[in-house]
Image: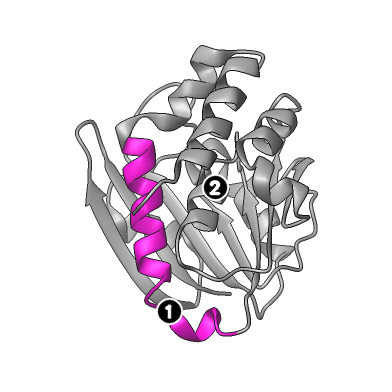
Amino acid sequence: MQIDTEHLHHWMRAIRESEDPMRTMDAFWRGQILSKEWLIAEIKKLEEYFINCPTIDIHGGWVGTLSSLIFQSDIGVDSITSIDIDPTCKKTAEKMNQIEYEAGKFHAVTSDMCAYESTADIIINTSFEHITQDQYDQWLSNLPLKSLIILQSNNYNIPEHIRIANDLEEFKSQTKLKNILYAGELDLPLYKRFMVIGQK
């Protein structure tokens, strides 16, 4: 996918002006970007969900990189809300998505994803490995039946990952989605990334 220079300028500004530039740069590791490009490539195939320019909520949106990549793809969206429990993410995410923020198409919210009530057409959670199964179950119970749900996790065993999946089948079981439209895995240098797309 193509990254335009105006968005790239805002990325660099967001990194430079963030509270922890080195930590913010972690959002641009190769595995992080490849995982997001993979997500975008797969949802583009679900054309029926994008006919009317849907709203998107991204839970665990971090510094807003996925939002920016979606905006720069040829996927038509009405707006994106990025939700993260870390209060330092909001300003960085707004700067990362400065163009869309100024246009009223991007919003960043500081909230625990388990307490946030999403009403979006599409709900994305790529921070699956950062919450317990009980927290996930609570999060899932709050989501609308009609929403398309996109989930990513991995088998990367590090301290900050409190619940990984050993393989795709285990991840599918953890998601508890009843209507799975897509399930796949992406081989990355240090780990496998898993993705499930479906509905409750």
Q: Nearer the viewer, residue 189 or 8?
A: 8
Q: Amino acid at mark 1?
A: Leu
The numbered dot on residue 46 is 1
Q: Which image quadrant for residue 80?
A: bottom right
109 shown above or below 162: below
Q: Nearer the viewer, residue 144 or 105?
A: 105
Image quadrant occupied by the C terminus: bottom right
> Which residue shows up at 25% across the image and 51% down it?
186
> Which residue shows up at 48% across the image and 35% down it?
8
Q: Position of residue 157 (x, y in %)?
A: 34, 29
Q: Amino acid at mark 2?
A: Ser
Q: Position of residue 137 (x, y in %)?
A: 63, 56
> How far apart, in angstroms, are the residues tagged by discs 2 and 1?
20 Å
Q: Is residue 114 visible?
A: no
Q: Position of residue 75 (x, y in %)?
A: 49, 68
Q: Which residue bears the numbered disc 2? A: 68
Image quadrant occupied by the N terminus: bottom left
Q: Is residue 35 magenta?
A: yes
Q: Nearer the viewer, mark 2 or mark 1?
A: 2
66 shown above or below 70: above
**Mark 2 or mark 1, earlier in chain:** 1
> Which residue shows up at 45% across the image and 24% down it?
26
**SS state under label 1:** loop
Q: Position of residue 154 (x, y in %)?
A: 36, 43
**SS state under label 2:** helix
Q: Which residues are magenta?
A: 31-51
The numbered dot on residue 160 is none
Q: Nearer the viewer, residue 172 or 101?
A: 101
75 shown above or below 189: below
Q: How is the image coloured?
A: one colour
Q: Is residue 50 visible?
A: yes
Q: Main secondary structure of the magenta part?
A: helix
